Structures are given as C-alpha cells and as structure tokens.
Amino acid sequence: MGQRTFDIPPGDSDGFTRTLRWVIWAASTAIVACLALSFHGAQVIEAQVNGWLLAHVFGLNTLTAGGQPTIYFFQASSGHGIPGGLAALVVTPECSVLLMLIPLMALFGLLLGLGRLKNRNLLLATAVTAVIMIAINQLRLAMIIGSIRLFGFARGYPISHIYIGSVFAVFGFALAIFVFIKIASRDSSHAPGSTE
C-alpha cells in the first residue's frame, strides 16, 4: 500500500504567519499609542536639542528650562519685544516631530505585518526617514527662532511659522516619504514572509 502524501501550500497554511502578523500589528499599535501619549516628553527633548543646536552650531545665546518645552533667546530686533530682551518659543504638540513619526510608525507596522517587503529594508527605511523628519523639524524650529530674533515677533513669527515653516515642513515630509519608499521597495521581488 503506497504512502499518501499531503502537499502543504506555501504561505501561512500553518497559521504561524497569520499569528506573527497579528503580533506585529498589535506591537505597532502599542508603539503608536505610546508615542501619542508621549507628546510632552518629546516636546521637552526637542526644545533641549534645539537650544543646544542654536547655541553650539549657530552661536546664539539660548536657554532651556529642565522639564519645559521652551527655548529662551535674546531678540536682536524690536516688534512685540525689546532689542536685546529675552524672548521664548514654546514647542507645542502641533510643532512636535511626533506628528510625523506616529504615521511613519503606523505605516512601518502595517507593511511589516503584510510581509510583502524585506524586513531589513523596512527597518532601514523607517530609521532613515525618522532621522530626516527629526532633522527637518529641528531646522524649522531654528528658522522660526532666527526669524523672531532678527525681525521681532510681530513680523518674524507669521513669516517663519505660518508661511515658510509650513512649506518647509510639507516638502521635508514629502522628501522623507520618498526616501522611505525608495529604500523599502528596493529589491522587493521575493517570496512573502522573507526576512532577507
């Protein structure tokens, strides 16, 4: 009597791949939720980093208060302030880079769970894109402070924050997503579930 053999179709027939995807999606959801609840901490870190950059890279006299998302600096022009007087910029949730990092992490979790792209490429794409987004936002904050310092709050803030800053952020976000797609989709023609 011949032996009967059963061919197991490729993919997630044993349920393991399906389970792994759900675990990845659940973990990604938890990370996104943690990021969404960490706005104040992220704002404080961004203010501290930007204050350091302005002081050590751009040579501006800045102050930051521990635990506060505020950057203090000295104005060089009048306009709702006194030349040489102390001014401040508060990093609000709307100005935080988390607004860009949260969708990025959600996209990472979704694509990783689907298993259509190489895991290594996805990890690299997410890391590089996050660095670009953080750098863009730090430059935007520095530009806002520089504009207020030079032109005063009345003129400098609307120009740098509402107009130029918004355009800068949109183009920066578009660049980051372009880089993400290029890296993540590189050599992606492989069997689903591959970790290469």
Image (spheres, rainbow, N blue to C red):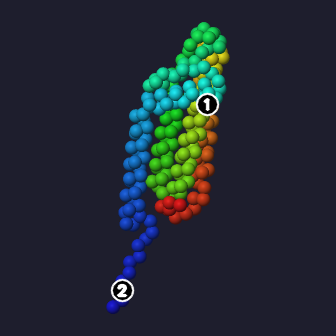
Q: Residue at x 57, y 62 (%)?
A: 189
- Please state which amino acid type lies under the numbered disc 2: Gln
Residue ID for mark 2:
3
Q: Position of residue 11 (x, y in %)?
A: 44, 65
Q: Residue at x 41, y 50 (%)?
A: 25
Q: Point out the residue furthest to the left here.
A: 1
Q: Earlier in the sequence, mark 2 or mark 1?
A: 2
Q: Quadrant of residue 14?
A: bottom left
Residue ID for mark 1:
139
What is the crowding at mark 1: few (fewer than 14 residues within 10 Å), some, or many (at least 20)?
some
Q: Position of residue 118 (x, y in %)?
A: 53, 57
What is the crowding at mark 2: few (fewer than 14 residues within 10 Å), some, or many (at least 20)?
few
Q: Position of residue 3 (x, y in %)?
A: 36, 86
Asked if marks 2 and 1 touch (Cβ < 8 Å), the reply is no
Whether residue 126 can be seen here: yes
User: From what the image shows, is residue 144 above or below residue 21?
Assistant: above
Name the element at disc 2: loop
77 or 4, nearer to the observer: 77
- Please state which amino acid type lies under the numbered disc 1: Leu
Labels 2, 1: front one: 1
Q: Position of residue 68 (x, y in %)?
A: 46, 23
Q: Residue at x 57, y 28 (%)?
A: 52
Q: Residue at x 40, y 57 (%)?
A: 20
Cα gap from disc 2 to disc 1, whole angstroms: 69 Å
Residue 162, numbered circle: none
151 or 1, nearer to the observer: 151
